[in-house]
């Protein structure tokens, strides 16, 4: 009896251990947090209160500026964003498109952002651009969408 119980317990432990090696797919928020080259974007997403959105059901496509892209933004502009949460949220939402848009599916032309304005996308072979930004790393898949790492921070038009 003891052997059978021990064997059953060992089987349950092995089964649970097998489940533990299958992590749940990361959300876009988790993906940003876990990608070292996106630490600035992740911090701004948290500051703007958008982390829950990017943990939500989605799906979303994020055109994610790299840390290098943020270094190219003038310090005064970054300070202004830090002091104006609504403007920061608008800029970040300008990088966010409803739905999952893989690089191979990009069509030349506009797409509407969560912020409300349009972004112009273009694809030539394997190269994808978003406005004047180049996609450096495409198709970073997440449970609730996809991210494309871009080399520039995009600023929404002043009218929105």
Image (tube, rainbow, N blue to C red):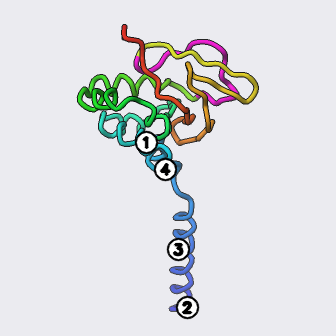
Q: Is residue 129 magenta?
A: no
Question: Disc 1 and disc 2: Cα gap in Å?
Answer: 47 Å
In the picture, the disc for residue 36 is 4
Task: Give SS at disc 3.
Answer: helix
Mark 1 lies on residue = 29
* Viewer-proximal residue among 2 and 114: 114
**Number of the front mark, 1 or 2:** 1
Mark 2 lies on residue = 3
- Residue projecting furthest to the bottom: 2
Residue 57, percent across and down?
45, 35
Question: Disc 4 and disc 2: Cα gap in Å?
Answer: 49 Å
Question: Disc 3 and disc 4: Cα gap in Å?
Answer: 37 Å
Labels 4 and 2 touching (C-beta < 8 A): no
* Viewer-proximal residue among 16 and 62: 62
Q: Who's the residue at 55% across and 36% down the image? A: 149
Vertical relation: 44 (above or below) 152 = below
Task: Give SS at disc 4.
Answer: helix
State the extent of the magenta-drawn residues as a range. 101-115
Mark 3 lies on residue = 12
Q: Earlier in the sequence, mark 3 or mark 2?
A: 2
Q: Earlier in the sequence, mark 4 or mark 2?
A: 2
Residue 104, percent across and down?
70, 28
Q: Earlier in the sequence, mark 1 or mark 4?
A: 1
Question: How many numbered marks appear?
Answer: 4
Q: Who's the residue at 42% across and 38% down the image? A: 41
């Amino acid at each position: 009896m003891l052997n059978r119980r021990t064997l059953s317990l060992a089987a349950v432990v092995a089964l649970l251990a097998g489940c533990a090696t299958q992590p749940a797919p990361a959300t876009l928020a988790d993906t940003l947090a876990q990608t070292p080259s996106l630490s600035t974007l992740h911090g701004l997403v948290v500051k703007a209160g958008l982390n829950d959105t990017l943990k939500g059901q989605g799906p979303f496509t994020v055109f994610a500026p790299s840390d290098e892209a943020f270094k190219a933004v003038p310090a005064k502009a970054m300070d202004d964003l830090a002091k104006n949460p609504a403007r920061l949220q608008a800029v970040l939402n300008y990088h966010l498109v409803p739905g999952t848009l893989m690089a191979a599916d990009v069509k030349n032309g506009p797409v509407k952002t969560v912020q409300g304005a349009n972004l112009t996308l273009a694809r030539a072979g394997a190269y994808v651009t978003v406005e004047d930004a180049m996609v450096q790393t495409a198709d970073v898949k997440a449970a609730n969408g996809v991210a494309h790492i871009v080399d520039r921070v995009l600023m929404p038009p002043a009218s929105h």
